[in-house]
Image (cartoon, coloured by chain):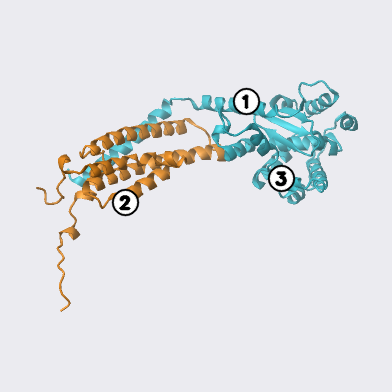
Chain colours: A orange, B cyan
Amino acid sequence: MNEEYYPLQQPEDIPTRECEDAMGAYFMMFASLAAGLPLPIINLIAAIIYYHINKHKSRFVQFHALQSLLSQIPVSLLNAAAVFWGISIFLFDNPFSDIFIAFLSVVVLANLVYLIFSIVAAVKSRKGRMYYFVLFGQLAYEMVFKIKEDDKEIYENAPPY
Amino acid sequence: MTKRNRIYRDLLILALVFLCGWLFFTYYPPICSDSVIEKYEKQENNLGELLKNSFQLINVNKDTNFIAKSIKKIFQELNPEITETYDIYIAEDHTINAFALPGNIIVINKGLIEITENPKELIAVVAHEIGHIEENHVRKKLLATFGISVIFAGSDAPLSAITQILTESAFSREMEREADDYAVEYLLDNDVSPKYMKDIFLKMKENSIEIPEFISTHPELDSRIEDLSDKYDIDNEIEFDVDWEKVKAEL
């Protein structure tokens, strides 16, 4: 057993409700669609709220919520850049160039890749399995499962006298 | 490799993949930007044609009545490029107004022509509308109000709402000043004194007492009139051989 990290729960030990909560983390990317506004920040806000609501449930749920949140950040930033760049072209006379089309193409591809991996992660988490994204999986694991120094301290209550 | 190094490595790989993808699509774009612009402008022209159909118009370029032929002659003598680049129409409307529509369309109400004393004042108004077109104000106003869907088929905004925005609501103060500046340069380049722009603005203001809503749709008229000082003197100012009073009588 690794003394630096909390042990991982196995699929058979994870309640169905927690599996569903973990799966729900990956649906926050659709929040802006539900809101009806093409604002990428809404997805990020939804992911942040979902994480804070669910982080106290179990480390399994916390991990998936955090992985979803962390991976949502770069995608939201790219989407926001695309939206603002597009607005600047139409309203502020910035040139409509092949560089912008190339950026849009990469952003569309990034969203597609993110969508595919999120669906895979949602399916895996529903089965009680851990699934690690490139970079963000490792980050989320470190942040959730690593035993912090504060956690090692054992506090003992004592009487006033 | 330590965990931290692994994280930095993954971050670097993701950044590189993004940059390589961007570079690849810059040199091999899925759609050429020129074809997108061409399609966009075509859609804009289609929208302009649709909007134009909601007015009763005299086509200065094509109609053969006295008014159209006289005004066309004025613009041909001033600068033949005007009638080639812009579609100018006279509307059967006796309110004092002129406006630009998508697709290089300029509409002047009969009411505005009625208050002019000579063709150069009409030219000044047209130059101002050309300024709005060339500075992309019409496009920006439409996009800011309705979004990109207004240009393409399937827009949710009805044509009447679009028409009202383009004909009745004001451009921003900055846009009006930009159009004024453009018009002044345009008039000077074509040997017409900008003082005629001041003259027509003054007449518009005088007539606005009877048409108070004109003030709200043309902000800062006083300061714009003041900016058009009498300092512009033209040598060899162009003259037109047109009986302007007869043109006005025919309206």
Image location (x, y in percent) of residue B159: 64, 32
Residue at which label 3 appears: B217
Quarter of the picture holding the C terminus of chain B: top right
Q: Quadrant of residue B29?
A: top left
Q: Chain of mark 1?
A: B
Query: Residue A10 at x, y = what percent?
Result: 15, 42
Residue beneath label 1, please? B46
The reply to whether discs 3 and 1 touch (Cβ–Cβ < 8 Å) is no
Which residue occupies the foreground of this view, B33 or A11?
A: A11
Q: Is residue B49 left or right of residue A7?
A: right
- Tell me the chain of label 3: B
Of residues B103 and B28, the one drawn nearer to the viewer in this rendering? B103
Secondary structure category for the residue under label 3: helix
Identify the amino acid type marked 2.
Ile
Q: Tell me the residue at 19%/56% (across/down).
A: A148
Indicate the amino acid at tag 3. Answer: Thr
- Please give the name of the residue rendered at 90% of the width and 33% of the height, measured from the top-left corner: B245
Q: Give me the chain letter of mark 2.
A: A
Of the residues tagged 2 and 3, which is closer to the observer?
2
Vertically, is A61 above or below A90?
Answer: below
The kind of residue on which mark 1 rests is: Asn
Place of residue B196 in the rendered image (x, y in percent of width and height, measured from the top left): 81, 41
> Contact, CB < 8 Å: mark 2 with mark 3?
no
Query: Could you classify mark 1 by the number of other residues whose Cα lies within 10 Å: few (under 14), some (14-19), or many (20 or more)?
Result: some
| Label 2 sits on residue | A53
How far is the residue under mark 2 from the one under mark 1? 51 Å
The crowd level at tag 2 (other Cα within 10 Å; few <14, some 14-19, many 20+) is few
Closer to the eye: label 2 or 1: 2
